[in-house]
Amino acid sequence: MGLQLEPSFVQEAEHRPEPTISDAGAIPLVDLSSPPPTLIADIEAACRDWGFFQVVSHGVPLELLEGVQSMAKEFFSLPLEEKKRVQRDEENPVGYYDTERTQEVRDWKEVFDFTVKETFHIPVTEEDGRVRWREVRNQWPEHPPGMREACKEYRKAMEDLSFRLLELIALTLKLPPNRFNEFFKDTTSFIRLNHYPPCPSPDLALGVGRHKDAGALTVLAQDDVEGLDVKRKSDGKWVRVKPIPNSYIINIGDMVQVWSNDKYESPEHRVSVNSEKERFSIPFFFNPAYYTNIKPLDDLITEENPARYDEFNWGEFFMGRSNSNFKKLGVENTQIHHFKKKEQSLSSGGGHIVADHGNMGFQTVLNRKHVPGAVNGVQIQNLSPGADHIDSVHVAQVLEQVSGASVERIHSGLSGIVQNRSGAGCACTKSETKVLEFSQKFPGK
Ligand SMILES: O=C(O)CCC(=O)C(=O)O
Ligand SMILES: [Fe+2]
């Protein structure tokens, strides 16, 4: 295996795995053979308190999983040139690759992706605004023989289990069990075979950097080597998920978060690596049809519980996420909090704006303030219980969230130098208040 620990893998200090991770009070365990009232109550509690749980008695034959696991092992042990024969690229986003980035940092892993539909088409918007159809087509390797069949059988079982889980989740929300089914007719679901080789510096790199899964649900099989960490909602601590034989780990994705209007949240998680053992895992990402427009379900919206998200299109959201995995963009990639309704527009006058960086675990108070000579000025204050500093990327996001226009440059205030929004090194440290000037680009100008 050819991964070399070069700088692109090294996490910033604040995101490196801590030497000790609490593994007490493991994530909830749900027995899918429990009688319905217990089962629904257990799933509701698990979705509400964690968004992450393990299931047993799930009905997926163990041989199907073992079949795919042994194919994955054989495939990843092939020479790199052989694996690259089915390499994914910017045109066709499925196949083999070892260059994925999460939050701008390379992941210590190699993967093979395949979709549930052997082939489908998605519209992509070119830079000149023209829309063209891109074909997504599974690329099956010649070796090991039988991989395609094993994977196909397994994905059917994953789809069945996911529909069942989503029906149970609908029941916990007091919705008809099939309420979500319409969104998955032309599903963009896919399976990922993950291989995390031993890493010489597990203190610096991560197998997958901190992230939330974008789709509706993830159904994950891990082997007996631990490494998956989930951020506990109650206190923001990273908790190691202990492998349980013949179980699946379920996590709520961003789309269920939006449909449920934040009743359930998509939890942040990551994968730590270790220096001795390789690890394999197989997530099934259960995703809607690309043309699905996503918004909080009308059935759940009331005057007391108004919609917290603007409507957006799943296909565009997902493409925005995946594109940034190919190249370093210098900005945070598309995240679900970008679609949160704006509480108040900056241009609507003075005042006090609280921007909620849900997935980063901190809040910022913005006070509109006129700064002479600047295009725009704001006062920011880091009220974060969890983040030691807010950097320019975060500030730019907040400004964009509240004003609806993209931030081009931060002129001064953070580090005193002109920088684009991806400039590093500037900070607003805990409890600090700073005034900064920035310029924005409004759509169409
Ligand atoms: O390998 C794992 O345990 C989790 C992987 C994961 O979170 C992902 O691929 O999105
Ligand atoms: Fe994930």
Image: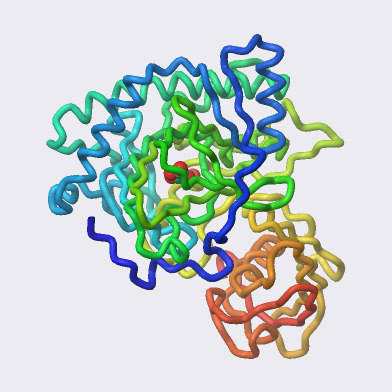
Q: Examine the rendered structure and indicate whether residue 365 appears above or below residue 122.
A: below
Instruction: Decide if residue 286 is in sight here.
Output: yes
Q: Position of residue 188 (x, y in %)?
A: 41, 34
Q: Position of residue 367 (x, y in %)?
A: 82, 72
From the viewer's perspective, tell me whether residue 377 is left or right of residue 10.
right
Residue that appears at 71% across and 50% down: 341
Q: Position of residue 331 (x, y in %)?
A: 51, 67
Total labels: the figure holds: 0
Name of the residue lying farthest toward the top: 35
Residue 267 sits in quarter = top right
Q: Examine the rendered structure and indicate whether residue 356 appears above or below residue 215.
A: below
Instruction: Decide if residue 320 is in sight here.
Output: no
From the viewer's perspective, tell me whether residue 239 is left or right of residue 124.
right
Q: Examine the rendered structure and indicate whether residue 311 appears above or below residue 322.
A: above
Given residues 440 and 129, the one toward you in this image is 440
- Image quarter for ligand 1 equals top left
Residue 309 sits in quarter = top right
Q: Considering the image in quadrants, where does the N terminus appear?
A: bottom left
Q: Considering the image in quadrants, where does the C terminus appear?
A: bottom right
Q: How is the image coloured?
A: rainbow
Residue that appears at 38% across and 69% down: 8
Q: Examine the rendered structure and indicate whether residue 386 appears above or below residue 422.
A: above
Q: Position of residue 330 (x, y in %)?
A: 47, 70
Residue that appears at 38% across and 17% down: 61
Given residues 408 and 355, the one toward you in this image is 355
